[in-house]
Image (cartoon, coloured by chain):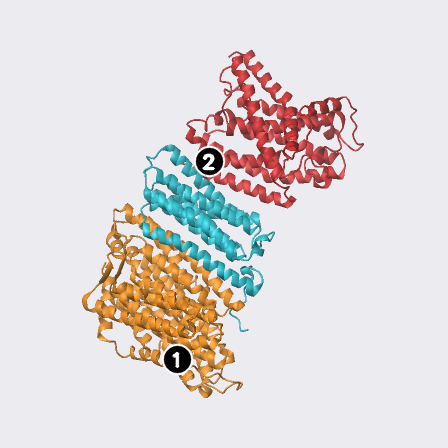
Chain colours: A cyan, B red, C orange
Amino acid sequence: MTNAHPLITEVNALLCGFFVLSAFAMVVVRQIGACIGVFIAQSLLLAASAFVLGAQPLSWHLFAVGCVTLLSKPIVIPWLLRRLVPREIYTAREISQSLDVPTALLVALALALVGFALGARLVHAAPVSAPENVIVGFASLLIGALVLAVRREAVPQMLGILAMENAAFLAGIAIAPDFPLIAELAIAFDVPLLAFIVALLTRAVYRRVGSTAVGELSALREHAR
Amino acid sequence: MTLWQSLALNVLQLAFVVCLAPLFSGIAARWRERVQFKRGPSIWQPYRDLRKLFSKEDRSSESATWVARFAPYAVCLSPILVTLLIPVLTDFPLFGAFAGDMLAAGFILGIGGFFLTLAAVDTGIPYGAMGASRTRMVGFLAEPVLIVILFAVSFVANSTIPYIVQQQWVSPPAHFFSPAHVLVLVAFSMLIIAETGRLPVDNPAGHFELAMIDESKVLDFSGPSYALLKWGGAMKTTVLCIIFVNVLLAPWGLASSPAPTQLGIAIAAVFVKVVALLAALVVVETSLAKLRLFRIAEYLGAAFVVAVTAMIAAVLAP
Amino acid sequence: MILFAAVLLPVFGAIWCAFPRSGRAAPFVTALCVALSFLVALWVGARVAGSGMLVAFDGWVQVDAFAAVLMLSIAAVACSATIYSVGYIAHLRQPPRRVRTYYANLALFIVSLMAVSVCVEPGLVWIAVELTTLLSVLLVSFTDTRDALEAAWKYMIITLLGATVAVLGVLVLFWAQHVAGGTAFSYAGLAADAHRMNPTLVAAAFALLLVGFGAKIGLFPMHAWLPDAHSQAPAPVCAMLSGVETSAVLYVLLRLSPVFRAAPGLHADIWFALFGAASLAAAALLIVQTHDLKRLFAFSTVEHMGIIFLGASIGTATGNLGAIWQILTHALTKSFCFFVAGAVGVVAGTTEIANVRGLQRYAPFVGTMLLFGALAIAGAPPFAIFLSELTIALAAVSSGHVWIAAVLFIFVAIAFAGTIAKVAGMALGTERAPGNHHPLPASLVAVIAVAAVPVLVLGLWVPVGLGTLLTQAAAQMTSP
């Protein structure tokens, strides 16, 4: 499984290292535009990893996955967001979150360690072509969940979900390289649809509430009104 | 290699650092201005400043004690001691190489900074105390980063002696791209920016005392003391840059035998490498705004996270 | 093939709604397409009951007995919900463009639900489940109030979070099968290779899928979105969400359960039982203190999902029969309850329990049906749910898991008491403040009347074809 060229292994490991850094960056960034930039970088890293892993042994399947990722995530989704969500929310200086940045970073670090431990257990149980993908995938999944929990704004919450999906697919290209292509293509079309629906809902929230701070909406509760 | 040769090489190393440190700081200052399309001072200006300052009178406040008189010497001596520990020109260890590892180097530099901080409080001016407390905040946040970087390095190289670490990531070339290596580079460069007081942590060319972190500590010194402080600061920056390029980033071009031609090539190579690193730092400086004081904690937190990721990558490396 | 017809017929309704001139006809065309889809589903069910599996693409799209049961319940609820929408949406008086969008959205949502029942390849199934979420979000926020948008956002975020965790579970399952040398990535293929798969991988996949799909099913503690989404969405949408969407995802987990059962040391049945019992208990206790009728029915959904899990955890043929039957009866009964809740909202103007009194006086039809619905969903005889719950309890006792039967009995009793207390207060008693009461649109009356029939009838008599389907499905699930 690991009889690939060592340069390939090292470069792939490097891409995974930057991938987990981008997951941390998503916890830290303060502007929504910067959040989108981090997401684009993460998607590019995912596509690059797919291309690198598909280079040797040669797998057109992984190349197709990389191309589809490259088309849908860094290009289509930011375009959808820019077009559908009102422009004003991108110029806000700082977006609110429930935890301050250093605390959120430390929690993210703890989650990353848990993710690394879980991924390492799985990788030891069964052979896989690129174990670092699995480990980083699990860690970034948990960090994406933290982004979702911590952010109070709509667009970063959605980017947290998409980051989790990126992480799941980063693990997927290593553990399931010949996952049925039809399913991969369908998933690729499903992600822009997700962004579309979320953007529509965000627009509706902005129109009705006046801001996209969905974490502030907490009127529905169990007490009699 | 005889003892005399080894001593001579050590002296050569020291001379390299001591003599060229002001030149490096002059180059950095000039390029910082040139990037902004201004003329900038001459690269030899720091030497002229040092000469002027050594000929001036040394005055200190009445309440200052021996700490304020001793601090310039401490600040100047600590980089000199560290130079003896690190590979500046040669990639074979000289005597003194095993007297301390990178952790010792970090803490010896810390001794210089410690005395300067005490002296800033000792002189009695309010800006000094303010700068001292801010420097300590940056310092204690940067400590974990340094220690975790050294952990990461030691997982890979099984040692923290700079000469041994330097062999680790050079060959085969694939190892250069290993995630532990690259993440250590990123974390260490963020650390250098914090420790040497460059933007985005602190503005070395700023004149507004309330915004200063490092510069306000030296406000009450004059004459030769001030000259020694400036020189010591430049030497500290140079030493950190040399550790970065010679041990971690590009450990090529060093002399592998005491032959004069090799040494000449090594001097030129190290000069070019340090200047290239300074150019990169200048580009980073001029493209980022200064961080608000309490955001420095976030910056160093991010550096810490990068360092821990490097360590995990080093542990989990297949 | 015929399966594609069943799944894709409502698309024509959606296409019709895309044209701006469709206007008044849009609801009726959509309802017609969905009704045709229901008829096709009936035919498919009869075919499967008679001659076994119906295959479109082997290993990808095929329908066996369990899938046919699910397909029938989806189609039935979809048909009734669409016809109900005709009157309900008209009552809401939204602009025509929004109404057309609603019907198009509803049609596509029905398509995605039917797709969940016919796909057998877990990747396709995951896509279908994700599509059900995406296509129902805008339906939940249809009334466009601040609370509706909050509910829709919470629903979307929690279920998408679950879906993302679940996709990793599907990939790990693929990995496990690949390493064990199997090639057929479908329910049947996975069950066949189950004994060879690496237990650590299967355990990881189980955890991921349970948490991921559990968020969509509404298992405790991932149920937080259910009451909010149901209290804010229009009644027909609630009926579909509660009645069939949660059941469809539960169906997926149950189809994958042979893989988890075969893994040594995983004790999947104990986990199922724990989550089921926790959901049941939490829901019963939450029912007692709720203040809104639709929230009450939403908690009841969580309760029934817990009961189905408990039934499936037993492992015997009778337990599986009870669980599958509960899926069908719950779909029919819960949709009926939400139709009635919608009618209460139309007639009295609100669904707050404290604000509605004496429905029996000024709207006798709605009041009676409300009592029927509450009794039915709480599990009173002679309604359908009583029989399926009884089956599960008997299966538990006869296979030695007496604690399951005890938990079932206690918490169903608590939920029963809570439901009846609150609903009786609404239906009986004197009218609080006689205000102006809206008349009930005709389609609502028709749908409620028709939907009440199977709720009662299935508690007394099971048609032969349906019985065959149910026993076949239970047998399939029991023996790998």
Whether residue C394 is visible, yes or no, is no
Q: Mark 2 points at which residue?
A: B180
Residue B132, image x, y percentages: 69, 37
Q: Quadrant of residue C417?
A: bottom left
- Please state if B202 lies on the left or on the right of B53 as rendered: left
Q: In which quarter of the image is the N terminus of chain A?
A: top left
- Residue C146 placement (x, y as % from top left): 54, 67
Q: Quadrant of residue C117?
A: bottom left
> Does residue C152 sit above or below C23 in this rendering?
above
Q: Is residue C35 depicted above or below C475 in this figure?
A: below
Q: What residue type is labelled 2?
A: Ala
Determine the secondary structure under disc 2: helix
Q: Mark 2 lies on which chain?
A: B
**Pointer 2: residues within 10 angstroms few (<14), some, or many (20+)?**
many
Q: What amino acid is labelled 1 in the image?
A: Ser
Badge 1 and badge 2 both on one subunit: no
Q: Depth check: give the residue in front, A22 or B67.
A: A22
- Say if residue C15 shows up in the picture: yes
Provide the residue designation for mark 1. Answer: C443
